Image (cartoon, rainbow, N blue to C red):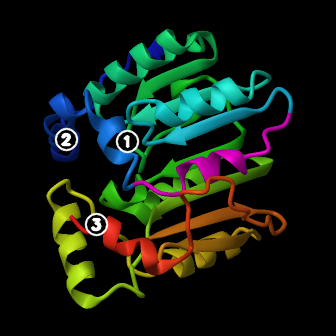
Amino acid sequence: MKQHSQVLPATRHARTMDDVYRYQRFIYDLTRKYYLFGRDTLLGSLEIPDGGRVLEIGCGTGRNLVVAARANPQALFYGVDISAQMLKTASAKAAKAGVGERVITVAGDAETFDARRSFQLTGFQRVVFSYSLSMVPDWQRAFSNALDQLSADGRVHIVDFGEMEHWPGFARRGMLKWLARFHVQPRKGLPGIVQALAAERGLVTSTRKLAGGYAVLIVVSRDPVPIRRSDPADDDDASIIHKMIP
């Protein structure tokens, strides 16, 4: 993986993320696969055109970039994350997977990131947020900033925590308390707010909820894009809730 060196201001959020993931990054992918539903459905719905460029904002360990790069050898992949610690793991993971030449990462803040400055290019065909908006302090600003990075025919793909509206009250409270330990805050009204911000730019959204509202998948595009389940683990049935209560 090519990693662009960029020194970020030592903001409180950057320091917090480095502290959280300094050691967690070594076990992150193993432990999160049971909780971060919808990631593979998102990746399977990208439909990247030949020669397309994909940007993941909040790329973390690089797991999604590696999976997508393996499945789409015709495309180039870029990642940005505020945690320098996570980017160390992302770099090693991409190199080990043999896709390091097509995966480029840089340290950056989702709220202010500018691809022209960081990668010397503009216009991504796909921009991805995978369980990252729930960790960005001003997530609406980060989403609006992502729209600025799109090509004219580009899409934004989002998967993140929902409001768990069909969960029993005790289970929802327990899950929210557990997520807060990792500085994760599910965004109330996420689909509606994304839809409103997208509409200001003439874009539309497609939405799908998983596991009783535990997670939500959103695609922002010029024309509606159906979201089809591509991973059997992404079950819409709330009966799987009991497996996820911490």
Under mark 3, the amino acid is Gln
Question: Do residues under tags 2 and 1 come within 8 Å of each other at their CB atoms?
Answer: yes
Q: Left or right of 46: which side holds 238? A: left
Q: Is residue 40 above or below residue 227?
A: above
Residue placed under numbered mark 3 in the picture? 185
Q: Quadrant of residue 135?
A: bottom left
- Over which residues does the magenta segment extend? 36-49
Residue at x 64%, y 17% (from the top left corner): 102
Q: Name the secondary structure under disc 3.
A: loop
Q: Nearer the viewer, mark 3 or mark 2?
A: 3
Measure the alpha-carbon separation of dots 3 and 1.
Answer: 18 Å
Amino acid at the residue labelled 2: Thr
Q: Dot 3 surroundings within 10 Å: few (below 14), some, or many (20 or more)?
A: some
Q: Earlier in the sequence, mark 3 or mark 2?
A: 2
The residue at the point 20 percent across, 80 percent down is: 173
The quarter of the rendered structure image containing the C terminus is: bottom left
Question: Depth-wise, is mark 3 or mark 1 nearer the camera?
Answer: 3
The residue to which callout 2 is attached is: 11
Which of disc 1 and disc 2 is earlier in sequence? 2
93 in relation to 142, above or below = above
Give the mark nearest the N terminus, 3 or 1: 1
Q: Is residue 38 magenta?
A: yes
* Position of residue 134 measured from the top left corner of the image (x, y, whole percent): 36, 61
Kind of element beneath mark 1: loop
- Residue to which mark 1 is pinned: 109
Residue 95's x, y, as percent? 49, 10
**Image position of 227 with respect to 35: above or below:** below
Residue at horizontal 32 percent and vertical 19 percent from the top: 88
Q: Which mark is residue 87?
A: none
Amino acid residing under circle 1? Asp
